[in-house]
Amino acid sequence: MEKKSTFGFTDFAENWNGRLAMLGLAIGLATELMTGKGILAQLGLM
């Protein structure tokens, strides 16, 4: 029986990576709309 890999470019890892990226983008846009500042301004970099 072959052991299933849980590290590297697996379908499982790529699915979670995509989901978390979409969630991060949505949270970033919502935060920008609520504060009126971009992410760099919120972090004090601009």
Image (cartoon, rainbow, N blue to C red):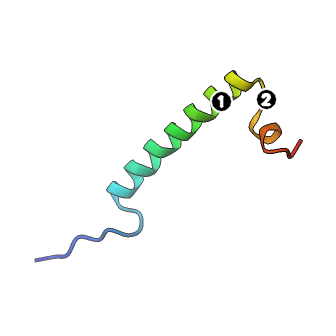
In the picture, which quadrant includes the N terminus?
bottom left
16 relative position to 27: left or right: left
Is disc 2 in contact with disc 1, using a CB cutoff of under 8 Å? Answer: no
Q: Marks 2 and 1, Cα distance to the nearest angstrom?
A: 8 Å
Question: In percent of the image, x 58 and y 36: which residue is there?
Answer: 25
| Other-residue count near label 1 (Cα within 10 Å), few / some / many at <14 / 14–19 / ≥20 | some
Q: Position of residue 26 (x, y in %)?
A: 56, 31
Question: In percent of the image, x 32 and y 68: which residue is there?
Answer: 6
Say which residue label 1 marks.
Answer: 31
Observer-nearest residue: 10 or 27? 27
26 relative position to 46: left or right: left
Q: Earlier in the sequence, mark 2 or mark 1?
A: 1
- Answer above or below: position of 26 versus 16: above
Q: Position of residue 40 (x, y in %)?
A: 80, 41
In the picture, which quadrant includes the C terminus?
top right
Label annotation for residue 37: 2
